[in-house]
Amino acid sequence: MMADIPAIQTEALVKRYGPRGTTALKGLDLTVSPGEVFGFLGPNGAGKSTTIRILLDLIRPTTGTVRVLGADPRSDPALRSRIGYLAGDFVADARQTGRELLTYLGDLRGGVPARRIDEFAARWDLDLGKRIGSLSKGNRQKIGVLQAFMHEPPLLILDEPTSGLDPFLQQQFVAEVQAAARRGQTVFMSSHVMSEVQQTCDRVGIIRAGTLVAVEHIDDLRKRALRKIEVHFDTDAPVVEAAGLSDVVVDGTVLRGKLAGDADAFVKALARHHVVDLISEEPELEELFFTYYRHEEA
Ligand SMILES: Nc1ncnc2c1ncn2[C@@H]1O[C@H](COP(=O)(O)OP(=O)(O)OP(=O)(O)O)[C@@H](O)[C@H]1O
């Protein structure tokens, strides 16, 4: 079954730059399932771009195996047309217009309907008639996003894709990734922008100094993370105690606090009172990611 073949699989991947150079990857084992949005996180120099360049056969591993969409990128040139690739510093021939470039790349990838390109450009407020050399960095990066997504490839490999994009466009990017995920496309993305990771990824892998130190489901992180909660009662707020609840502050009819893990004990403790409203905020995973970065440094 196609669905059982991982979208990406690396085993014992080692990359040494030159005989005496840096060992950027020290035996990386990574599996990304089809249809999954996978965030590839780690500090500067951890080996993210090295991994991504190997997946695309832009550079070759020292040892280890790589499978992308079931194929070896070293011996399957047709693979490239089934991947959408974007790096944070998208470069293209400055003399071409956006439309010329995209039409050319679209043809290479088996044809892309002109309407899809136009709709995408409209969503991104992008003028395709201008020469690429005359565009701002952000507008060039928009063309980069478009060329990666436009053929709706089964696999998107994105290396810090939103660098240079303003917050509004980062949000537009999040929407494109979510739409790709709904179509069943697999997305493998390195990023330093935690909010976009949190909004798009099913799982994250943390790489440090060339090895994968953690792989987590975002849902599990969410459950473990502290959520701010606020409960409104019809009379003075009671002092509620429950497993997972901390930092409780009572202010008139309102109780505020932080909740970690399962909400069950808290909800059952509340059930004895008249609850008018219950607000639970989306957890901020940024803090949790930071603890990973710090933790592994020790
Ligand atoms: N062409 C190269 N020649 C020699 N060393 C390199 C080369 N490219 C990367 N390295 C080294 O390999 C290590 C991993 O770099 P890589 O670019 O993969 O990290 P990264 O996780 O993508 O970092 P960033 O978040 O800064 O983009 C670093 O120590 C880097 O200096």
Image (cartoon, rainbow, N blue to C red):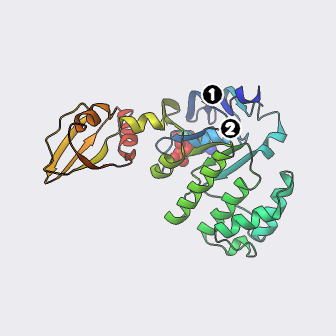
Q: Amino acid at mark 1?
A: Leu
Q: Position of residue 94 (x, y in %)?
A: 73, 69
In-image side of 181 versus 106 (left or right):
left
Q: Identify the secondary structure beneath mark 2.
A: helix
Q: Quadrant of the N terminus?
A: top right
Q: Which residue is mark 1?
A: 13
Q: Which residue is mark 2?
A: 54
In-image side of 147 versus 233 (left or right):
right
Q: Tell me which residue sits at (20%, 41%) in the image.
A: 273
Q: In front: 2, or 163?
A: 2
Q: Residues within 10 Å of mark 1 (few under 14, many from 20)?
A: many
Dot 1 beta carbon under 8 Å from ligand 1: no
Q: CA distance from mark 2 to mark 1?
A: 10 Å
Q: Is residue 226 above or below residue 171?
A: above
Q: Identify the secondary structure beneath mark 1.
A: strand
Q: Is residue 52 above or below residue 3?
A: below
Q: Amino acid at mark 2?
A: Ile
Q: Position of residue 77 (x, y in %)?
A: 83, 40
Dot 2 beta carbon under 8 Å from ligand 1: no
Mark 2 touches mark 1? (CB < 8 Å): yes
Is residue 200 visible in this depiction of the protein?
yes
Q: Position of residue 224 (x, y in %)?
A: 36, 34
Q: Position of residue 208 (x, y in %)?
A: 47, 35
Q: Earlier in the sequence, mark 2 or mark 1?
A: 1
